[in-house]
Every structure is written in structure tokens, then in C-alpha cells.
Image (spheres, helix red, strand yellow):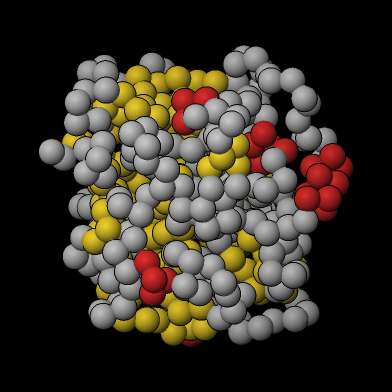
Amino acid sequence: MVMLTTVAFKLLILNVFGIFATSTVPKASDWPYDVTELKAPDGSITAKFVSVGATLTELWVKDKNGKARDVVLGYDDPSKLSSDPDHPVFNAIVGRYANRMKNGTFSIPISKDPTSGPGVYHIPTNDHNGQVTLHGGLIGWDRRNWTVVEKSETSVTYKHIDKADEGFPGTVTAYATHTVSDGGVLNTVIRATASEKTPIMLTQHTYLNLDAFEDGVNDILNHTLEIGGSKVIDLDTNAIPTGKFINVTGTPFDFKKAQAIGARWSKTVNLCGQGCQGYDNAWIYDDDVSQKTGTSLWSDKSGIRVDISTNQPSVQVYTSYWMNTIRKKVHGGAGKKYGRWSAVAIEQQGYVAAINTPEWGVDQIYSPERPFEWSSTYKFSTVK
């Protein structure tokens, strides 16, 4: 999912908070754009991260011929993570509350359509003409500067302290640990504790193109997708849940059996918003997928496959309809852009806007007595 705000407004906000990037490319050692490289001992996977957003900037895995490809989108200049007005949220940790919030408003305890009064909170809106807060507010965790607190050749841990930013109650202290291991495995764990009751929903907003823009392939429509979910969250015109679910059987949402993303493409018009073609929707997993695969994606062209397990109950799949960003050099450089359908963001998360949907009975309020944990594992392999 992407933030749809005006360029001028975004640049103003970034300057006010003092995080607008300079025109020069920062050095790899310049915090918060300091690069940490992790390599698995067997050479199967290499990942690079920067401190802003605890963000994944490169992810190198081997194709069916043994050649390494960088399969995530991004920038050559990591300072653009803080300043790009299009703000695609490349591969960052998103919070304090990921995805959407109706009217930027919630209550503790949660209630339907709160407006004002004790326990009602208002977060700045930034999407759908001021009717929605997306990804935590004007400056969410993806544009906050995290700090490295522990590092080895295969693992790095970042820390972020959210001191009631964007109007959320209390202070949340979060640690995000990224680890690579033999067999092409990337694991990310985020643990967060709150000083008082507050909603928390996090995700890792990872954009994948398993062909890495090689062999003349510039989109993900021929990538094969499989999701272990029989229902998606029904949305209104602002992409806010109605409280209902859609049974995927017989619809373009049905990926219980592996399908090419573009297999029913003509039927996806308006699924991701009025005039939008593709997906920007949340599937609910049928089962606990913390110890088994919940989502799989692969390309027959490159032979690269990823199987994802998670402790989260849902996965958001966004096929990049709004993407319009200059590519990094390894993907073709400044003469080319990441455009529509150039990647698929696969975001493991909780139920969208559950804090606005009390009829679901989903508890996303955390406290000193109830810490939060998010975990996802990405296992890369090859198909022939």
C-alpha cells in the first residue's frame, strides 16, 4: 500500500521534522543511512539494511542457475527513504499502527465510530482526502531513525522509541532483529513494549520482484502466488473494512491453489480502489502459519521461490498500481522507473483497522502487561 498525499504537503512535513535529505548521496557510515550487510555462512543469501525505518535495502538470493539477484525494490541513495514525496515505503518496518485507520480516530476501549470524549484519540490523516490515516500518520516508523544496538555477521538489531509520536498514547519501545541463515533464510522479529494502553499493529512492507528486472521482465504478472486464506476483508471506497469478509471461492481473490498473479487480471479492475487494477487487499489465514508456510511466491523465469511463515493472522498483498519511482542501478538505473505492477508487496500483519471494527472482537490494544511481537520468516529456494 502507498500513501497518497500531495508533494508539497509531504515536503513541508519532512522539513518541519528536520529529516529532509540533502542532495548528496550519504556515505554508507552516515546514520541513519548507515548500511549493515548480513551474509549467510553458506552464501545463499545476503541482505543490507539501514537505520531509517530498520529498512531492508538489498536482498540477494540465487536463481536457478546459481546467479545472485537483488529481489527487492529500493533506492541507490537511501536518504530518499526519508524524502521521496511519492513515499512507496520500500521494505521498512511500519508502525505504530500499520495499514489504515478510519478518520484517524480510535478509542480505548475500542468502539464504533468514536468522535470525542475520554479515551478517544486523533491521529493525523494522510490518505483518501483526509478520511484515513495510513501507516501510522504523517511520519510513521518507516521514516523514524532507528539505532543499531547489536550486530554480528548474520544479524542486526535496531531500537526505536516512539514517545507518543503522531498523537498515540504512551511510549512504545521497539526492537527489530533481522537475521540471515543457511538455506536462503531471512527472519525478522519485532518486539515492542508500551508504557500504557495503546494500539499496535506492525508490518514489514517488502516489495518483491523475483526476476529482479532481468531477461526483459518488468512486472510480476507471471509470478505465481499461493495464499492459505479462504477469505479477504471487505472494504469500503476508502479501503476501510466494512466488518464483513469475502469468500474467495470463484473470485479473483482465490489463491488457495497457486495461480499467476495476472491469471484473472481483467477481473481485478477496481479491486484495489476506483480505477485501480490489481490487488491491495488483506487475506485472513485459515490456520496458524507460524510453523508452516502461509504465502508462497515464485517465478518460473528466474526459478526463485519464497515461502513465508508468520505469527500474524493476515497478509496484505499490494501489486504496486501507484508505483512510479526511479529504479536502483542494479535494476536498470535512472533511465528506467519502477512502474505499475513492477513488484508485489507482501505484508504480514493483523486485521486491518480492527481498532475501528469492534464487531470482530480482535484485540490490538497492548500495555505494560501485554507486550507485542511480530515475526516472519522468508525461505528462498529455487524451482526448475
13 shown above or below 154:
below
Residue closer to the observer: 285 or 362:
285
Where is residue 56 shown, x and y percent of the image?
49, 34
Question: From the viewer's perspective, is 148 left or right of 302?
Answer: right
Residue closer to the observer: 11 or 170:
11
Residue name at image x 72 percent, y 61 percent: 126
Residue furthest to the left: 384
Residue closer to the observer: 211 or 92:
211
- On the question of residue 283 being in view, the answer is no
Question: From the viewer's perspective, is 87 left or right of 374?
Answer: right
332 shown above or below 138:
above
- On the question of residue 90 being in view, the answer is yes
Which quadrant: the N terminus? bottom right
For the image shown, how many numbered marks are present on the structure? 0
Where is residue 117 shown, x and y percent of the image?
78, 79
269 shown above or below 171:
below
Residue name at image x 20 percent, y 52 percent: 292
Where is residue 51 shown, x and y percent of the image?
59, 29
20 shown above or below 66:
below
Residue name at image x 60 percent, y 30 percent: 334
Where is residue 348 shown, x and y percent of the image?
41, 55
Residue name at image x 13 percent, y 38 percent: 384
Residue closer to the observer: 133 or 324:
324
Name the image quarter holding residue 250: bottom left
Name the image quarter holding residue 304: top left
